[in-house]
Image (cartoon, helix red, strand yellow):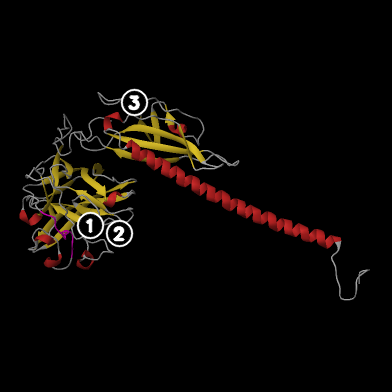
Amino acid sequence: MRAGTKPGEHGFTIIEVVVAVALISIGVASTLRVFGASGRTAVRAQQSEVAVSQAQGEIDKLKTVPYGALALTSPPPSSADPKDPGSRVKGTSLRIRSNLSEQFVMTPAQGQAAAVQPGPESFSVGLGATPITGRIYRYVTWRDESCLPLLCDGTQNTKRLTVAVAIDPTGGSSARAPIWSSTVVVDPDAAPPGSQAPPRGGPGAGDPVTAQSFYLYDTPCGQGQRQPVTASHDTHDTASAGPSAADNSTCDNPDPAHQPDLMGATAPSDDGQSSLFEYSSDLTGDYPGGLALRHKGTECRTSYTPTESTDPSAAGKWSVHAWSTAGLPKLFHMSRLVTLSLFTVSLGGATGAGKLCATLIDRQVTAGVPTDRVLGTGIYDLSTWPTTIRRLTFSFNLPQAEDVQQDHRLVLALQLRGESDNDVALVYDHPLYASLLEVATTTPL
């Protein structure tokens, strides 16, 4: 019993008090560290959101500049700091990836002035004592597209708009890597795809290579030739596959709505009307016309079962669409290179990525049942799908050169993959929006 205490009463010694205070201090310090780390995480997340928003906003502004004026007003600054966007600037080019650099666009089109200030330009977001501040860097570079000669002559085929946003460090934090955003724009006044490319042969080069164009129509392929578009309609069931002839979407199916759409060599002409009709009026969504595609499926498909056809949750007729040529009049030799040029827009003008599969098929039909041979598939993965009607042109190579025999049909299947952020519309079979497939060949039809 301690002196001065009554039986049953206990106090604390000095040592016990010191130990208790030490334990409490450790607990409080740990709690403060947790709160501090949580606060820093929240601040970094907020900074990232601001950087992404600033970058996308700048891209949207640059896309409103006329194509000819998309040129830098001065050379962008370079830097040795790996966290400075200028570290990617090497002389007159910008490093896009470790194995790819692109030349800056420094000269505007004739009669126009360069409109893109490279920066850096400072910005500040937020009020009070701790706004988020940073710098915006802008770059315009030339892209050398890999496609047929007349579409992509030379090395200055399209322009890449790139924006980097660097956030200023706050509260003793270290500098962060910049946020990057980019998009590719096409000259709207360039020669439209679809023109026959000049021969590329020569002594020892073999047969001359040219381009065979196949324009996409809204006409069921059983009709054999394009019909003028006069009204909107429900989505055609163009890629169904099943055990019986009735289950298969072929040009021989007696139901026109159960056939692939047609593609042919003639560009759609002006039929005395300029309206854009909907080819998917059974779907809801804000789009100017053409075919609406839902983003479904995680692999490139060329067909779907009859059950999947009308299942909104499956990659059915609203996600996979097919076009077919008429029976080929002679053997068609394909020299690997394939180019697809599509007018497209996201539904509702929603911003986001898009992933489109394009597959070519050699088809022979016997008693209404197709025998398909897949020739090759290309995947177009775009970080920002157009929010207004724009032409996208991309190319891919078949694994090898192929021959499609006389009387067989060449089929194109497109699918909007589920990894896309939004549904999209494909606009075609219209004088202003002549979407098409183009194939390098030595035996043009």
**Which residue was labeled with disc 3?**
106
Query: Residue 284: x, y in percent?
Result: 23, 59
- Locate residue 283: give its quadrant: bottom left
**Which residue was labeled with disc 2?**
297
Query: Does the magenta run of residues contain 153?
Result: no
Residue at 20% x, 35% y: name it: 151
Q: Is residue 181 above or below residue 74?
A: below
Residue at 25% x, 30% y: name it: 154
Of circles 3 and 1, which is in front? 3
Circle 1: residue type: Val
- Locate residue 14: give its quadrant: bottom right
Q: Residues within 10 Å of mark 1 (few under 14, many from 20)?
A: many
Front residue of 206 and 35: 35
Q: Is residue 425 above or below residue 86?
A: below
Dot 2: element = loop
Image quadrant holding the C terminus, namely top left
Going by the picture, which residue comes out furthest to the front?
Answer: 128
Residue at mark 3 to residue at mark 1: CA–CA distance: 42 Å
Residue range in magenta is 231-241
**Which residue was labeled with disc 1?**
320
Going by the picture, which residue comes out furthest to the right?
Answer: 3
Image quadrant holding the N terminus, namely bottom right
- Label 2 with label 1: CB-CB less than 8 Å: yes
